[in-house]
Amino acid sequence: MLEKWQVKADLKVGSMTNLPYSNDSFNAVVDVFSAYCLNEKDLEICLNEVHRCLSPRGKFFYIHHLK
């Protein structure tokens, strides 16, 4: 898809419970229909990881499917 759009991106593979980024790496994190698949314990870990990776004034956008 990146080739089709003629754009470049630095893609990384990682776990939602162990994000491969350093502290305060992002001004925004977006999750669309991913974290809702996690159990309660892993969701808590994931949210802590997102918080760790966000800059102090960073924003988190999260959309999920209600079960």
Image (cartoon, grey):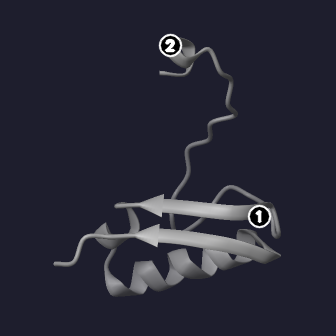
SS at mark 1 in the image: strand
Frontmost residue, 2 versus 38: 2
Q: Looking at the image, which residue is at 16% across and 78% down?
A: 67
Q: Position of residue 53 (x, y in %)?
A: 73, 68
Of the residues shown, which amino acid type is indicated by label 1? Asn
Q: Position of residue 33 (x, y in %)?
A: 34, 61
Compared across the picture, whether 42 is left or right of 8 comes to: left
* Residue position marked by numbered label 2 in the rendering: 4
Q: Looking at the image, which residue is at 67% across and 30% down?
A: 9
Neighbor class of circle 1 (other Cα within 10 Å; few <14, some 14-19, many 20+) is: few
Image position of 1 with respect to 29: above or below: above
The quarter holding residue 52 reads bottom right
Compared across the picture, whether 51 is left or right of 32 comes to: right
Compared across the picture, whether 8 is left or right of 33 comes to: right
SS at mark 2 in the image: helix
Name, please, the residue furthest toward the left.
67
Neighbor class of circle 2 (other Cα within 10 Å; few <14, some 14-19, many 20+) is: few
The quarter holding residue 11 reads top right
Q: Position of residue 41 (x, y in %)?
A: 40, 86
Asked if the residue under mark 1 is in contact with the one under mark 2, i.e. CB atoms within 8 Å, the reply is no
The quarter holding residue 51 reads bottom right
Image position of 9 with respect to 43: above or below: above
What is the tally of numbered marks visible in this picture? 2
Frontmost residue, 1 versus 14: 1
Q: Which mark is residue 57?
A: none
* Residue position marked by numbered label 1 in the rendering: 27
Q: Looking at the image, which residue is at 63% across and 74% down?
A: 49
Of the residues shown, which amino acid type is indicated by label 2? Lys
Compared across the picture, whether 26 is left or right of 51 comes to: right
Whole-angstrom CA distance, mark 2 to mark 1, is 27 Å
Q: Position of residue 36 (x, y in %)?
A: 32, 71
